[in-house]
Structures are given as C-alpha cells and as structure tokens.
Amino acid sequence: MSGTTELDAPKLFAAVEALLAQSRHVETVCGQGVMVWRYWGEGKPVILLHGGSGSWTHWIRNIPALLACGRQVWAPDLPGFGDSATPSGGGDADAVIGPLALGLREVLGRGPHEIAAFSFGSLVAALFAAQHPDMVVRLLLVGLPVLPLHHGRGVALPPIRTAITPEDRAAGHFANLAAIMFHQTSGIDSDTVALQAANVVKDRMRSRKLVTTDACALAVRALQCQFECVWGAEDVLYRERWAEAQTACEASLHCTRITLIPDAGHWVQYEQAETFNQSLTTWATQT
C-alpha cells in the first residue's frame, strides 16, 4: 500500500461517474432529510440494497449486467448511509424499514417487488419482506447474516479514525477489506480502497447490533416469498458454519437455492463479479 492515498482511484471513480451520468434519481422522505434513489434503464424493476458502511456503489460491477438482461435497476442509498439521511427510528436495520417502505411505495408502488440485497442490506430485506409480505415477491440474499455473529460484527477490524496520514488511512482501509470483505488480497487495488474510504466516511449507523442476534433467522422463517441465498465460499463470517447457515435458511419452505461461489469472500458480487453475475442474471430473468 506504499504511496496509495484515498484519492488514487482514477479507474474506479471513472466507472462510478459513468454510471452516475447514466442514472436518474428521486428523493423520498427519510428522518429529517431524504432517502436518495438512483435508477437506470427501462423494463421490469429490480431493487438493489447495499451492505453496511456502503452505498449503491457496492453494486457497481453488477448494475451493467442487470441492464444488459433488460431490467430496470434501482439502487438506493439506505437510510444512514451514502447520500441518504439518518432514519429517525434508531441506528440499526429495523429503523430502515419504515423509510424504505415509504420510499418504495412512492417511487414504484406497492409491487410486489423483486429485491437483491447484500449483507446488512439482506438483513434489511428479510425484515422488510417479513413485515410487508404484500410488497415483495422474490429475494436474492447475498452474504445474509442468518447466523448471529460473534464479538460484534464477527471480525476484529483495525481503527481508521486514529490514522493520521492519508497513507495510514489507506492502509487501514486495505486491512479492513482484507479482514472481512475479500478472500484474495490481490483483488484489493487502489480503486477498491478509495471506494471503501468514500463509503465508510458516510456511515452514520455504527451502533448496528442486530447481526449479533437471531433477528435475521426469525425474519427468514417468517418469509412468505421465494428467496435464494448466495455467499462467497470463503466468507470469513461463515466459512466454518455452512451447515448451520444452510439449516437456518432451509427452515423456511420458501428457500429455493443456496449458492457458494468459489474463491470469494464476503463482498462476493465485487470480488468474483463475473461468476456472481451469472447467478444474478439467472435469478433476474426467471419468470
């Protein structure tokens, strides 16, 4: 990481800017501000929900694939992340449900909708679908925290806020990505570090603790819609617990498929985008 700074990301930000240039956006009420929804293309809509300490950019390697198969893509910044305001009801996934439901009804109607969601976003999606079964017809749950994580979020992460220099901050972001998000550190380039840095600084939901409880498993058992689960096979949060995770998902009769993608960590849709996009577009083109 020597010589890398949080601004050394010409390729990645070019990709982000290209998608932003193609996007349209709307805003809905959220807390004391707004929830920002970006969308692309035409056709039947699919909603993408990002992970914790993230934004819509968690999906930058997947949006083009969905557009190519004829779907309209909606990728909001969840309340408390990215450009969206903090929700008024608390600092965890359950506080996101209200503004998400309000916003979704406003921008796309009651549906029912198809939602693909990652990590914290998949917890939000499961809670949302359990509480609003009439609004969701299918889910693709990526990196689902269906088992309670131990010791906070499950992995000890080095602090970023105490880093003094840009090089120290970049090294901290790299270490965090290597610890929890990636299986192969060779995939963490300066673009990826810069994306992580840009997202983490906008995370205002740092007291998240529902992932340490059985809230996700309970929501999964309550689901009335079909859902699939996808994980990176080397996801550090679960790679020693696949049998337990499978049992938790299959506690619901609506679980239709569980996929483990080889050579991928937690951020599977980014690290192994080509393989993941095959699963994503197969799911997205099902009738």
Image (cartoon, rainbow, N blue to C red):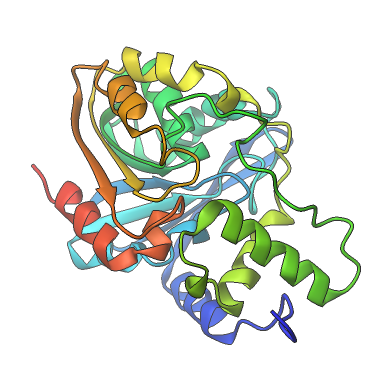
Where is the C terminus found, in terms of image quarters? top left
Residue drawn at 42 percent across, 27 percent down: 146
Decide: is 51 above or below 70: above
Q: Residue 51: x percent and y percent?
A: 52, 46
Decide: is 244 above or below 274: above
The residue lying toward the viewer, choosing from 254 and 156, is: 156
The residue lying toward the viewer, choosing from 281 and 187, is: 187
Residue drawn at 34 percent across, 49 percent down: 233
Residue 115 in the figure: left or right of residue 119: left
Q: Residue 174: x percent and y percent?
A: 65, 66
Q: Residue furthest left?
A: 287
Residue 20 in the figure: left or right of residue 169: left
Residue 98 in the figure: left or right of residue 193: left
Residue drawn at 33 percent across, 21 percent down: 248
Q: Quadrant of residue 118?
A: top left
Q: Residue furthest front?
A: 240
Answer whether residue 38 is visible to the viewer in this image. Answer: yes
Q: Residue 79: x percent and y percent?
A: 61, 39
Q: Residue 264: x percent and y percent?
A: 38, 57
Residue drawn at 67 percent across, 62 percent down: 175
Residue 37 in the figure: left or right of residue 221: right
Answer whether residue 43 is visible to the viewer in this image. Answer: no
